[in-house]
Amino acid sequence: AQSVAQPEDQVNVAEGNPLTVKCTYSVSGNPYLFWYVQYPNRGLQFLLKYITGDNLVKGSYGFEAEFNKSQTSFHLKKPSALVSDSALYFCAVRGLNNDMRFGAGTRLTVKP
Amino acid sequence: DTAVSQTPKYLVTQMGNDKSIKCEQNLGHDTMYWYKQDSKKFLKIMFSYNNKELIINETVPNRFSPKSPDKAHLNLHINSLELGDSAVYFCASSQDWGSTQETQYFGPGTRLLVL
C-alpha cells in the first residue's frame, strides 16, 4: 500500500535559517510524491510534486524538495525561512486508486 | 474566481440531523474528491467521482452519500449526524483520474461541529 510518514509533529526554526520538513515514503511501483501546505483555517495549497526526472524539485514560495530513492525520502526544504512560512505541512503520495494518501502533517513554526 | 469552493464554511448542528455540504469547481476538471480531516489534522480520502461516476468509496458509513449532478459539482449528504462526524471536510478536484501525475486542488474546507 502507498503511504508516507512524517516523523516530526513540530519543527521550529528561526527566521532566516534553513528549514527542513521530513517525509519518507513506502510505495509499490513508481512514487508520485507531493507537498501541500495548510495555513490556519484554510484549505490545502499545492507546493510541489515529484513525478520523474531531477531529484531536486522546485516549488512555490521558494520551497524545494529532494527525492532520494535509496533513503525513500522526500524532504521539503527552504534555504531561508520566513515567519509567514509558519503553517501545517503535509507530505502525500498518490494512492493506487489515484487518491492522495497524506502524512500526519508537520507544524512548522518560524520565530522572528 | 475561486477554483474550488465549498458551502457552508461552518456548520453547527445537533446529533441526529441530516445535513449537506456543497462543492463546486470551475477548473473544468473531470475528477472530484471528498476528504475528512479529523481533530488531529489527519486527512483521509472518503470518495472520488470521475465524470459523475463513483470511483473510490472508502470505508465510510452509509450515512454519508455523495452526489454528483454534473462534473463541476460534488455534494456530500450526511444522515443521522453523530458526534464523531465533527471534522473539517475538504473537497478537491483534479483534471483527470487516469493520470497519476495530476495535482489535486483543494477547497477551503467545511468545519462541521455536531453537538
Image (cartoon, rainbow, N blue to C red):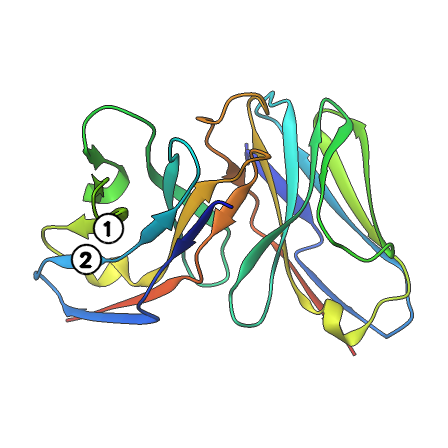
Whether label 2 touches label 1, CB < 8 Å: yes
Say which element carries label 2: strand
When the figure is inspected, residue B30 is found, relative to residue B73, above or below; the finding is above
**Mark linked to residue A75:** 1
Q: Quadrant of residue B17?
A: bottom right
Q: Horizontal placement of B39 versus A104: left or right?
A: right
Query: What's the chain of the residue with tag 2?
Result: A
Name the residue located 74 percent from the left edge and 37 percent from the top edge.
B74
Q: Horizontal placement of A15 versus B99: left or right?
A: left
Please rate how many residues cluster around mark 1, counting C-alpha atoms within 10 Å: few if below 14, some from 14 to 19, many from 20.
some
Q: Position of residue B26 (x, y in %)?
A: 61, 27
What amino acid type should be assigned to the residue bearing mark 2?
Thr
Q: Position of residue A108 (x, y in %)?
A: 29, 65
Between circles 2 and 1, the one closer to the viewer is 1
Q: Of callouts 2 and 1, which one flags the residue occurring earlier in the amino acid sequence? A: 2
Residue bearing mark 2: A20
